[in-house]
């Protein structure tokens, strides 16, 4: 891609800009840029939540494209803009087709477009299913740390729904210093349970692994619980299962009946985002007619504006913010640029002279 200047325009004082080169970054490059960087990415996600909390971001509601002929599928658009050091705009466009799993490919597929702050030009298209899973896992690991600071640190983790996201969350917990005595797992699919168990056995984790036949058994025997199912509506409603006051990372957002939330301390990533799309917090708002059950955001907890009581269940429901995808995407872009392996599409933008 060549820098472009219109000769006539050089006669006036208008600052000249060139169209940036356009790069394509593959999933393999994304994985190479992120592998082993769990701590750095979790710190980046923390900084991004702080920036978002301080208002240095634009993160409009996600747009859900749904299909009458494929009711379980959706494609979500997450446009966003982030300031601070990252200073980039963009869009994640992510499909969720749950039937893919039975056909042998992952549920989610995605691209992330990065737009230049000054010209608006898109300058990169990145494979983004890995970026999305990574920022989700980093957010979960951060929340596990922040929300357990004033409580006994969990030693027994349990995963309900053990697909790709659960695997990434486990990797990020391990990569940010967590170790557990026990790891429980529960999934409706025996294949998923066996696959996740196999992954755990190959990781360095020395924890005792138990596959639980019921969600009740898993919840009662875990003090950190991760929900990463594809449930569309609540399937967990018995308050007594939570009487040991666990910390719950409710990543799949729709597993818990609103009554569970009403008996818990509730923390979200962004209030407006999370109270939409029939998430459990949205159902709790509809049930009560107010938002009193919400204590605040993770940023509120990090900034000390909200404290977490020790003897109540805590539920973190992260809607998933486009600003996180942008921050992680720009991190990947910078890593790939630094490695000298950037694949630029020559003449991607080719109509650059206003009058030909
Ligand atoms: N909040 C966020 O930011 C965010 C980001 C990414 C993904 N997610 C969510 O994470 C979830 C998991 O994604 P994935 O890619 O791992 O999906 P996946 O299809 O790979 O795995 C989901 C697993 O959940 C199991 N499952 C479904 N219903 C269940 C139930 N009622 N009880 C126990 N197990 C059940 C399935 O058998 C499957 O093994 C999805 O709901 C996705 O939308 C959330």
Image (cartoon, helix red, strand yellow):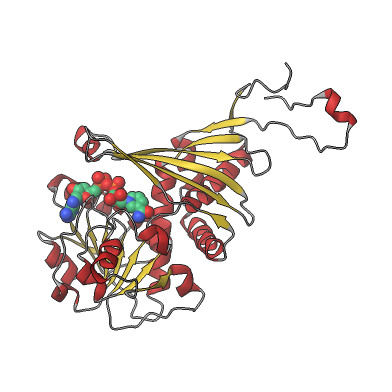
Above or below, 329 against 153 in this view is above
Rendered residue at 51%/49% (across/down): 328
Q: Please provide percent x and percent y for residue 218.
A: 16, 65
Residue lying farthest to the left in this orientation: 213
For image coordinates 60% across by 47% down, the residue present is 88
Quadrant location of residue 181? bottom left
Q: Nearer the viewer, residue 102 or 283?
A: 283
Indicate the quadrant containing the N terminus: top left, top right, bottom left or bottom right: top right
* Vertical relation: 331 (above or below) 316: above
- Left or right: 7, with 248 as reference point: right
Q: Position of residue 171 (x, y in %)?
A: 36, 55
- Residue at 57% in and 66% down: 54
> Can you see residue 215?
yes
Q: Is residue 325 left or right of residue 152?
A: right
Give the image location of residue 146, x and y in percent: 43, 72
Outermost residue to the right: 11
Question: Which quarter of the figure has residue 276?
Answer: bottom left
Locate the C terminus by quadrant.
top right
Taking depth in this image into account, of 111 and 292 the one nearest to the observer is 292
Q: Nearer the viewer, residue 141 or 235?
A: 235
Task: Decide which of 320, 204 is in the foreground and name it.
Answer: 320
């Amino acid at each position: 891609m060549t820098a472009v200047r219109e000769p006539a325009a050089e006669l006036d004082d208008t600052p000249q800009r060139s169209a940036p080169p356009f790069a394509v970054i593959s999933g393999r490059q994304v994985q190479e840029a992120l592998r082993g960087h769990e701590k750095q990415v979790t710190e980046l996600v923390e900084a991004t939540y702080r920036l978002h909390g301080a208002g240095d971001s634009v993160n409009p509601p996600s747009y859900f494209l749904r299909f009458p002929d494929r009711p379980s599928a959706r494609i979500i658009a997450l446009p966003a803009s982030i300031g601070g050091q990252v200073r980039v705009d963009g869009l994640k466009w992510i499909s969720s087709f749950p039937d893919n799993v039975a056909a042998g490919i992952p549920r989610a597929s995605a691209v992330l477009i990065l737009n230049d702050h000054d010209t608006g030009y898109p300058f990169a298209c990145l494979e983004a299913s890995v970026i999305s899973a990574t920022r989700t896992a980093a957010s979960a690991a951060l929340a596990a740390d922040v929300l357990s600071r004033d409580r006994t640190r969990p030693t027994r983790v349990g995963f309900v729904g053990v697909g790709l996201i659960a695997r990434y969350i486990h990797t990020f917990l391990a990569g940010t210093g967590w170790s557990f005595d026990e790891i429980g797992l529960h999934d409706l699919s025996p294949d998923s349970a066996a696959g996740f168990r196999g992954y755990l056995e190959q990781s360095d984790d020395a924890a005792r692994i138990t596959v639980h036949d019921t969600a009740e058994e898993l919840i009662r025997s875990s003090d950190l619980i991760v929900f990463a199912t594809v449930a569309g509506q609540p399937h967990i409603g018995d308050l007594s299962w939570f009487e040991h006051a666990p910390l719950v990372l409710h990543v799949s957002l729709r597993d818990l009946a609103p009554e569970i939330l009403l008996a818990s301390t509730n923390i979200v990533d962004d209030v407006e985002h999370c109270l939409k799309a029939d998430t459990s917090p949205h159902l709790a708002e509809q049930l009560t007619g107010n938002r009193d059950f919400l204590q605040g955001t993770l940023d509120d907890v990090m900034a000390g504006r909200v404290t977490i009581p020790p003897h109540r269940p805590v539920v973190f429901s992260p809607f998933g913010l486009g600003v996180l995808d942008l921050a992680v995407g720009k991190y990947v872009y910078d890593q790939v640029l630094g490695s000298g392996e950037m694949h630029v599409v020559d003449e991607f933008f080719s109509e650059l002279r206003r009058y030909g």
